[in-house]
Amino acid sequence: MKEKQYTAEQEQIARFAKAMGHPARMAILAFLANQESCFFGDIHEELPIAKATVSQHLKELKEAGLIQGEIETPKVRYCINRQNWELARKLFATFFGDYQCTETSCCG
């Protein structure tokens, strides 16, 4: 059986897409993109979900590298990971630019 190999770019864009695959995470990213940084409580106040759920979403975004957090005892301050934000922007733009549907290439 032939094993499929994916490119590093395909692996990375899939990681970003998976992390962004929930509306709460998109709301968190939008909120953080408009701030220099903010604390967990600020994020929790923006979302109509439980603190534990916000924590889980932040963990997913952080593991994907889209955000970063610094502990400032007793709080955690979050912000966009600018380097990975730019990488994600370029990967998604390239992907959607490279694979455009035309009248003859996609179901229509």
Image (spheres, grey):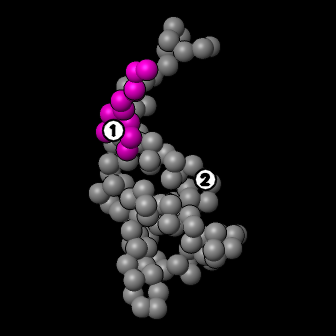
User: Of callouts 1 and 2, which one flags the residue occurring earlier in the amino acid sequence?
Assistant: 1
Is the residue marked by circle 1 packed among few (<14), some (14-19), or many (20+) residues within 10 Å?
A: some
Q: Tell me the element at label 2.
A: loop
Furthest-front residue in view? 1
Could you say which quadrant of the image residue 85 lies in?
A: bottom left
Res. 33 in view: no
Most extreme residue toward the top is 104
Task: Check the image and report above or below for 19 versus 91.
Answer: below
Which x, y percent locates residue 8? 31, 39
Q: Is residue 49 covered in magenta?
A: no
Which residue is found at the position 53% from the left and 11% from the top?
103
| Mark 1 residue type | Glu
**In-image side of 79 versus 23 (left or right):** left
Mark 1: secondary structure? helix
The crowd level at tag 2 (other Cα within 10 Å; few <14, some 14-19, many 20+) is: few
The residue lying toward the viewer, choosing from 84 and 35, is 84
- Above-or-below relation of 64 to 12: below
Q: Where does the image place residue 98, in percent across and percent down from the top left?
A: 37, 25
Q: Which mark is residue 48?
A: none
Instruction: Establish if 105 lies above or below 18.
Output: above
- Residue under label 2: 22
Q: Which residue is mark 1?
A: 9
Q: Which residues are magenta?
A: 1-12
**The quarter of the displayed image where residue 94 is located:** top left
